[in-house]
Image (cartoon, rainbow, N blue to C red):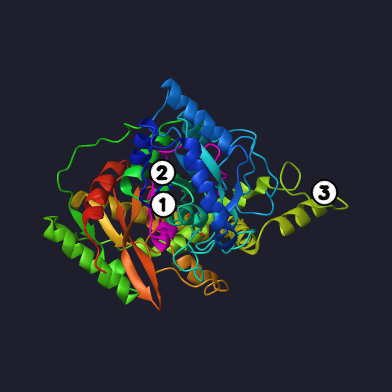
Amino acid sequence: MIDLKNLTIEKTHDSFKNGVFTCTELVSEYLKVIKEKNDELNVYLEIFSDVLEQAKKADEKFADGSFTLMTGIPIAIKDNILFQGHIASSGSNILKNYTAVYNSTVVKKLKDAGAVIIGRTNMDDGAMGVSTETSAYGVTKNPHDISRVPGGSSGGSTASIAADMALVALGSDTGGSCRQPAAFCGVVGLKPTYGSVSRYGLISMGSSLDVIGAIGKNISDVKIVFDFIAGQDKMDSTSIPLDFYKKKTIDRPTIGVPRAFISEGVDPRVLLNFEEKIKKLQSLNYTVKDVELPYAKYSVPAYYVVTPAEISANLARLDGMRYGYSAEGGNLMEVYKKSRGKGFGREVRRRILLGTYVLSHGYHDAYYNKANAVRELIINDYSKAFKKVDLILTPTTTGPAFKIGEKVNDPVKMYLEDIFTGPANMAGLPAISIPSGFVEEGEKKLPLGIQFMAPHGREDLLFQIGKEFESIKDGP
Ligand code: GLN
């Protein structure tokens, strides 16, 4: 028996090198857990049939000495990341049988490094949602309490870590989809700087915000995955070189807290947890200062104009003709209408309608351009704040994981879940959610997350403070 709960990338690597266990043995162990738990939790949509073959190749690399730190590391990927020859459905009916014809850059980098890609994880339809409830393949259950959602849209990936069904995972984050589910599942979720990880082969949602992120049990694992997947890529013109931003080491980064932004509509237990953590940081000699982010509260309304606009444009390619689901129809227009009507779920259709509306002639200035102007104001808020402080701290979410079905008929409540995570996407900033203890709900202990945001390119500061934060022992 391998102790999966306490396994890290480095420990795994050492175990491979020292012959404690092989990658084939480790993967078999994960497959056993997956077999036990997946029917109930619905974490994976598919376990790739070549997973043991991949493991064997990794073992060979250890035998001939051509390994890297990622060789043999079992990783789960979100269902919107292309892995050549494997299905990628983006949690959607319209891509149910779509087989990737090329590798995403992140998969290529991981495969070149020898990683073992276990399978594809459940997610909200088209990555639109905060609970995996919009998935065409049923909800994923939160491993801490199966009556609750795991968060979303990368809920399958974060649950895979919480339930020891993978060592690390990839997600995507357009408005919070790595961080919010990480908080709900009690794991670490990183949203890198926009452009620092190639989007090539990520099924697009909102192209000016999308980024692929890393998910794991701890900072060190997430950092290792990020280091392997980051970097400029000629296949993504918005990607940036690793040394794009100047980085000077900061011994004890100053932490800014936007209290006015945090006060409204937050579970008092979250606020209490947050203030306790601030005190602990202060006791470790960190300077914590108040910062103002007057426009951050407009991030949700602006995001839900900008993103649907980009979604409506990006998803136009799914027309029932080129690839994906195609319905029978008497003429071309009927094929379009039926394929899209049946292929996309309700939330995706809502976004496409909204996006088409805000881009339409006569409304473009009033909505789309206005939302982009608000986005500029949000970006300015952060640039000003980062002149005074090195990091910004907020809770990741307003509360712990909610019940399955609780918000499903109220899109606005769902959208408000992004309140603390969305601004980082609007401004392209890196941000990380780190486990911050638990709250009790009946018999269950539900995890909470805390979020650090940093200036562009300063993932290093997130990892630095993250490690420090991990060492702060939680209460009960
Ligand atoms: N909750 C947000 C949305 O539904 C963000 C999703 C994401 O980051 N992919 O759009």
| Pointer 3 residue Cβ closer than 8 Å to ligand 1 | no
Image location (x, y in percent) of residue 345 = 66, 60
Q: Nearer the viewer, residue 369 or 157?
A: 157
Element marked by disc 3: helix
Spatial CA span between label 2 and label 1: 8 Å
Please tell me whether residue 197 belongs to the stretch shown in magenta: yes
Among the 4 quarters of the image, the one containing residue 65 = top left
For the magenta stretch, what is the residue range? 178-205
Q: Secondary structure at mark 1?
A: helix
Badge 2: few (under 14), some or many (20 or more) residues near its Cα, within 10 Å?
many
Which residue is found at the position 61% from the left and 37% from the top?
Answer: 50
**Which residue carries the number 3 mark?**
332
- Report x, y in % for residue 368: 51, 56
- Which residue is depicted at the point 50% across and 47% down? 30
Where residue 103 sits in the image (x, y, percent)? 57, 34
Q: Is mark 1 within 8 Å of ligand 1?
A: yes
Q: Looking at the picture, does residue 363 appear above or below residue 18?
A: below
Q: Residues within 10 Å of mark 3 (few under 14, many from 20)?
A: few
> 323 or 26: nearer the eye?
26
Give the residue displayed 50% in from the left and 73% down from the top. Answer: 403
Q: Would you name the residue on which mark 1 appears?
A: 425
SS assignment at label 2: loop
The residue depicted at 64 percent of the width and 64 percent of the height is 346
Q: How many marks?
A: 3
- The disc label shown at residue 128, or none: none
